[in-house]
Amino acid sequence: MLGIADRLNTEVYADGGDGGVDLRYRGATIDVKTVGRHRADPALTVDAYDQLRADYYVLASRVGSSDMRLLGYAPQEFVANAPTQTHERRPYHLVEQAYLFPLVEW
């Protein structure tokens, strides 16, 4: 979509992530959060126990074994001000899908 496929970080991190940045585009850092097929109406969740490191957070939903659907994005300030939930004593920011900005050509 962005025309930068050769510069994407596609490595899978089984130990907790890559530090919050998956790609850089026009000077902005972007972290893509992926949810599995088991969620009918997924929301963007971003860990709240660490400092937010990306300028933008994108929500991608797995719709097939290797197919993803990009659902929307939220800027860092929006994520930082989103409600916080806790799962297994770990806090996270929660941005419901209805509040995400649509992905259009940047």
Image (cartoon, rainbow, N blue to C red):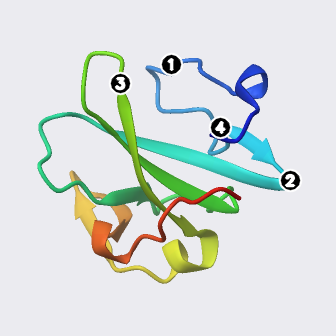
Q: For label 2, count other residues whose C-alpha is less than 10 Å away and answer few (under 14), some (14-19) or many (20+).
A: few
Between 71 and 51, the residue placed more toward the observer is 71
Residue beneath disc 4: 22
Q: Amino acid at mark 4?
A: Asp
Inspect this view and state whether residue 96 appears: no
On residue 20, the disc is none
User: Which quarter shows the N terminus?
Assistant: top right
Label 3 secondary element: loop
Q: Amino acid at mark 2?
A: Arg
Q: For label 1, count other residues whose C-alpha is less than 10 Å away and answer few (under 14), some (14-19) or many (20+).
A: few
Question: Which residue is painted at 70% across and 62% down in the image?
Answer: 55
- Report the number of numbered marks: 4
- Up/down of 76 relative to 40, above or below: below
Q: Amino acid at mark 3?
A: Asp
- Up/down of 9 relative to 74, above or below: above
Residue beneath disc 3: 67
Question: Which residue is painted at 25% across and 64% down in the image?
Answer: 86
On residue 26, the disc is 2
> Which is more foreground, mark 4 or mark 3?
3
For the residues bearing labels 2 and 4, Cβ distance under 8 angstroms = no
Question: Which residue is painted at 61% across and 79% down in the image?
Answer: 77
Label whose residue precedes the other's in the sequence (2 or 3): 2
Question: Which residue is painted at 55% across and 57% down in the image?
Answer: 57
Q: CA distance from mark 1 to mark 4?
A: 11 Å
Between 55 and 99, the residue placed more toward the observer is 99
On residue 12, the disc is 1
Q: Amino acid at mark 1?
A: Val
The furthest residue to the bottom: 81
Q: Residue 81: where, in percent of width, then height?
A: 49, 83
